[in-house]
Amino acid sequence: MSNGDIFVGEVIGTAILILFGAGVCAAVTLRHSKARAAGWVVIAFGWGFGVLAGAYTAAPLSGGQLNPAVTIGIAVDTGEWGKVWVYLLGQFVGAILGAVLTYLVYLAQFQANVADEDTAEEPTPTLGIFSTIPEIRNPVANLITEIIATIALVLPILAFGLTKGLGESGTTVLIVSLLVVGIGLSLGGPTGYAINPTRDLGPRIVHTFLPIPNKGTSDWGYAWIPVVGPLVGGALAGLIYHAAF
């Protein structure tokens, strides 16, 4: 794979991932959305379908990694670091693009994010549409959660490569998508399961600069946890896989 193919594939695939993932968060969160208050299960499946669509689309060009934690885990296992920067750059650009596209899809809903005089309902906080927010703010606990959840993502992904039938049938991406749904349902409660540094950082940057009425804080004091945690988890998963398999 050339650097150009990798970059384009990761940009497109990550943009689709974020469009679906942030999109389902917007659908469930924003007022005047037909899916408002649909719940956590809907969010988990929305992110899983985002992985499905994004990774299958990017696979012919870049392999569809879409996540620096996955890229780092593979590099730690294989020792091949030469193209890591291309993957990371593509993923970061794609995450920003996907967040902007989500904003455009829900533009009317974002613009209507003002106090409702008839019901006395306050404007909806919007950061959770773009990035993760811990349910209980405890940096140590939040970091541990992100590390463990990312290991639970990356280690199976690496192990799936040993399952010959998955590769031959082309169902590896489908299984990974279901894995992401499972992580969301089982491990997503404490922090919202970033498990992907650019998935959180890129949209958080977009949230900072978008002209969203009453958008609230972008919470940069917490922003390092969904970056550092997944990177550490991805590296640990690569080390575990390399040692055990």
Image (cartoon, rainbow, N blue to C red):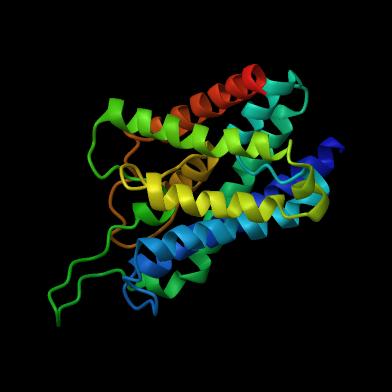
Please give left or right for residue 197 compared with residue 208 in the image: right
- In this rendering, the answer to whether 216 lies above or below 202 is below
Quadrant location of the C terminus in the rendered image:
top right
Residue 193 as seen in the image, left or right of residue 199: left
Q: Residue furthest bottom?
A: 118
In the foreground, 184 or 133: 184
Q: Position of residue 239 (x, y in %)?
A: 60, 19
Using the rendered image of the protein, determine whether residue 189 is visible from the camera's viewpoint.
yes
Percent across and percent down for residue 201 are 48, 40
Residue drawn at (24%, 65%), measured in percent from left and top? Answer: 123
Instruction: Tell whether 68 sits left or right of 219.
Output: right
Give the residue furthest to the left: 120
The quarter of the picture where residue 66 lies is: top right
Whether residue 66 is situated above or below residue 230 in the rendered picture = below
Q: Nearer the viewer, residue 34 or 168?
A: 168
Q: Residue at x 25, y 45 (%)?
A: 135
In the image, 215: left or right of 177?
left
Please provide percent x and percent y for residue 54. Answer: 66, 55
Residue that appears at 43% across and 31% down: 148
For image coordinates 75% across by 49% down, the residue present is 166
Q: Position of residue 189 (x, y in %)?
A: 32, 47
